[in-house]
Each structure stands twice: as structure tokens, then as C-alpha cells.
């Protein structure tokens, strides 16, 4: 789906009080293939949630290196993970290296999970999650662990006052940007 059509659909689901205040923006550079572009959400023309492709890979690598170099961090491995590495290597890797490779894979996945939880999303992730939001129910989006799905659901017109007020306790456990959009929506009631 083209960005302009997706933006129209997303903005059609905004609650009436936030229409014009909350905007979804995306930039890309047609003639510069190494420039991935930016995606961000603005509130009252102020950028509050930035999803940038430029620094995501660098931050993911830095996070991965920090996890690798942390001496106190113990990442447990199970036999299934080691067997998966053995299967991928077709039995050509020595046994002691299998553990090292499996540990590095797990560290890499952990770093990606950690970075995603810190809301470092890329433009491509925004497109995927926006499509997912448009295809799933509002209840699934609210109960999701994904930050962007929570934000899109909170500003949605299908979420009523009663449901918003009943979510107060759950919002205390969410990411600060989700809490920000929850407070924004409550102020618009």
C-alpha cells in the first residue's frame, strides 16, 4: 500500500478530538538509495515519536556489543538452540564452537528485542505494524506488547471513554511514550 493511502486510513481512525493534532509523517529520498528516510508521529506539530532508519543499525550493534562485553550477564542456552546451530551447520562445526555460535545468536536476538522495546523502530517496521493495525481488531492492538500498536490503538476513535478509563492500571506498566499518548487521549475526552 502506498504511504499516502496508508496515512489516509490511519488518520480516518483518529478520534475526532485528536484529528489535526496527531499526524503521521514519513519522508523518503527517491534519488538517494542509501537514504532510508524517516517516520515520525507529531502532536500539535511537535515531533514526539521518531522512527529512524539512519541510526537503528548502529544502535543495535552497540547494544549487541554491550551485551557481549557484560561479564555479569548469563544467557542460558538449551539443547534445542544448540541443535538448531548443529542443523544449520550440517554437522561440520566442532562441539565447543556450537555453544559459542548459539550464544552469539541468542545475544543478537536479545539485542534486537531490547532495542525494539526501547522504541527504536525503523520506517519499514512502521509500515508493517500499521498494516497489522489496520488488519487486526482494536482489542488485539491494545493488548499487544508492541509500542506502536498501542499508540495507534489509543488514538483510535473505536476506543471509548469506558474502555480508556478501565485501562489506567495497565498503562502504568507500559512504555513512557504509550503513557504519553494515553494521557493525550484522556485529555481529549
Image (cartoon, rainbow, N blue to C red):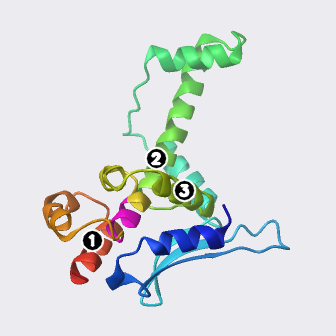
Chief secondary structure of the magenta portion: helix
Instruction: Kindly identify which numbered label has been placed on residue 113.
Output: 2
| 13 relative to 160 in the view: left or right | right
Q: Say which residue appears at 53% left-offset and 61% top-offset.
A: 121
| 65 relative to 79 in the view: left or right | right
Query: Is 88 drawn above or below residue 49 in the view shown?
Result: above
Instruction: Kindly identify which numbered label has been placed on residue 36.
Output: none
Is 159 one of the magenta-colored residues?
no
Residue 5 point in image, percent of width and height: 62, 69
Task: In this rendered view, identify the residue nearer to me: 176 or 108.
Answer: 176
Callout 2: helix, strand or loop? helix
Query: Is 11 drawn above or below residue 85 in the view shown?
Result: below
Tell me if label 1 and label 2 are in contact, CB under 8 Å. Answer: no
Task: In this rendered view, identify the residue nearer to me: 168 or 2.
Answer: 2
Instruction: Kindly identify which numbered label has been placed on residue 182.
Output: 1
Residue 172 point in image, percent of width and height: 19, 62
Mark 1 or mark 3: whose residue is earlier in sequence:
3
Asked if residue 118 shows in the view, the reply is: no
Residue 118 point in image, percent of width and height: 42, 59
Q: Say which residue appears at 43% left-offset and 19% top-offset.
A: 78
Quarter-of-image position of residue 122: bottom right
Mark 3 or mark 2: whose residue is earlier in sequence:
2
Report how far apart the C-alphas of labels 1 and 3 lie in the structure.
Answer: 22 Å
Callout 3: helix, strand or loop? helix
Residue pointed to by mark 3? 131
Mark 1 or mark 2: whose residue is earlier in sequence:
2
Callout 1: helix, strand or loop? helix
Q: Could you tell me which quadrant the C terminus lies in?
A: bottom left
- Per the rendered image, the range of residues in magenta is 150-155
Q: Say which residue appears at 65% left-offset and 12% top-offset.
A: 94
Amino acid at each position: 500500500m502506498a504511504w499516502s493511502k496508508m496515512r489516509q486510513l490511519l488518520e480516518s481512525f483518529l478520534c475526532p478530538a485528536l484529528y489535526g493534532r496527531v499526524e503521521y509523517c514519513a519522508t523518503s529520498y527517491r534519488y538517494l538509495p542509501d537514504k532510508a528516510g524517516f517516520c515520525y508521529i507529531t502532536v500539535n506539530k511537535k515531533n514526539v515519536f521518531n522512527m529512524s532508519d539512519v541510526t537503528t543499525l548502529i544502535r543495535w550493534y552497540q547494544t549487541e556489543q554491550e551485551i557481549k562485553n557484560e561479564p555479569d550477564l548469563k544467557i542460558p542456552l538449551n539443547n534445542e538452540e544448540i541443535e538448531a546451530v548443529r542443523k544449520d551447520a550440517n554437522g561440520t562445526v566442532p562441539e565447543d564452537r556450537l555453544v559459542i555460535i548459539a550464544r552469539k545468536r541468542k545475544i543478537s536476538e536479545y539485542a534486537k528485542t531490547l532495542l525494539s522495546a526501547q522504541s527504536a523502530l525503523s520506517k519499514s517496521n512502521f509500515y508493517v505494524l500499521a498494516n497489522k493495525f489496520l488488519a487486526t481488531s482494536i482489542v488485539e492492538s491494545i493488548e499487544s506488547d508492541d509500542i506502536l500498536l498501542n499508540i495507534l490503538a489509543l488514538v483510535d476513535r473505536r476506543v471509548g471513554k469506558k474502555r480508556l478509563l478501565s485501562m489506567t492500571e495497565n498503562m502504568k506498566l507500559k512504555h513512557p511514550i504509550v503513557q504519553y499518548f494515553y494521557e493525550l487521549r484522556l485529555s481529549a475526552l
